Amino acid sequence: CSRKVTFVYLQSFRNKSNLSVLFYGSDSCSLQSLKALHSNSFEFEHERVVENVSVVSGSENNVVSKYAKSNNLRFHLWPFEFQPHAFDIGVVASFGKLIPLQAIENCTHGMINVHASLLPRWRGAAPIQAAILNGDTVTGVTLMKIAPHKFDVGECILQEAIQMHPRITAQELHPILASLGAKLLIQCLKDLDYYLSNAKKQPSEGITLSKKIKKEDGLIVWDKMTSDEVDKRFRALNSFFDVYTYWIDGLKLKLCDVVDPKLAEEAQIDTLLAGQFKPEQILPGFIFFHKKRRQLFIKCCDNKWIAFESIWPTGKKQKINASSFYSGYMRRVNKNTPIILRDQSNKENVN
């Protein structure tokens, strides 16, 4: 009986204009939006739009679930079912699972998604990586209504674009877009009826899809990738997935600390190698240690070179610098024999 009285007492003091939010998230991008919602629930009355936040996630061990528990937010493991009108609005940010129609309809105002691209460009699982891999110069965040049965096709509520500096990494871009998404989310909730009623259908032109990144996407195939493609792949995947190649005996080598291709080009490796090897010996995958620069240069399929300052061989506790890699691996090979890195499926290396 006392528990029922307490519930009625708390509900009677609820500001009806504030929102009960059900949040779905899983990673560091999600976390910024969750923090913004949680923080807003403590704002002064004229700034406050969030009454309370409940959290749904697919794991009890990710950053979102840990934040929810440490801040005493109601937490539910996915899948989570609830009664109609139990929540005013659902918010989905970097969750990666389709929300059932029943859950969308059970939220009074439906659900909105915080998506890290300018939809309809880069619908799908990895919009940040896709933007870098494809050399985009502009990206941004879209808030959209969640539509059932398909990812990222709902009506656009809000968008904001940002410029991407030429060599930005996904690791750098993630927090920028996460912060922007959190800002737009609170902006939307402060005038929710207006934004929902003015949402627009996504254009039918300019639709692109970003596939889910797999660990195999980190493999560099030297005879099929240009130096620019290798650089973009490194900036898009590194810190989330290994970017790697294989040593001549099949040992996996994680590539670390890529050098700006413009600086690598200044080294004029072809000139340095003239006279040491015949042109037909300097194939894509040819690796060369530049002693003065203390960098490892690898030839790509466009006859340009990409450079790395360190390597992490499988079995080592940490990465080693280029000089150490040269001493421990490259010097063991006859100096007159070209060292060609190839993918693991092609182990008939001359060495």
Image: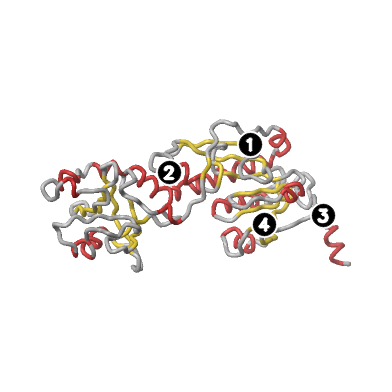
Per the model, the C-alpha gap separating discs 3 and 1 is 33 Å
Secondary element type, mark 1: strand
* Placement of 322 over or under 303, stated as above or below: below
Q: Earlier in the sequence, mark 4 or mark 1?
A: 4
Residue 52: x and y in percent read: 72, 53
Per the model, the C-alpha gap separating discs 4 and 1 is 24 Å
Residue most toward the left?
275
Residue 337: x and y in percent read: 16, 57
Per the model, the C-alpha gap separating discs 3 and 2 is 50 Å
Per the model, the C-alpha gap separating discs 2 and 4 is 32 Å
Label drawn at residue 156 = 1
Residue sitting at x 64%, y 43%: 186
Amino acid tagged 4: Val
For mark 2, does the 10 Å Cα neighbourhood hold few (<14), some (14 to 19), or many (20 or more) residues? many
Q: Earlier in the sequence, mark 4 or mark 3?
A: 3
Disc 2 target residue: 133
Residue sitting at x 64%, y 63%: 69
Disc 3 target residue: 11
Amino acid tagged 2: Leu
Per the model, the C-alpha gap separating discs 1 and 2 is 25 Å
Quick check: 244 left or right of 82? left
Q: Earlier in the sequence, mark 1 or mark 2?
A: 2
For mark 3, does the 10 Å Cα neighbourhood hold few (<14), some (14 to 19), or many (20 or more) residues? few
- Which of 340 and 113 lies nearest the eye of the viewer? 340
Residue sitting at x 69%, y 36%: 195
Nearest to the eye among marks 4 and 3: give it: 4
Per the model, the C-alpha gap separating discs 4 and 3 is 20 Å
Residue 255: x and y in percent read: 34, 56
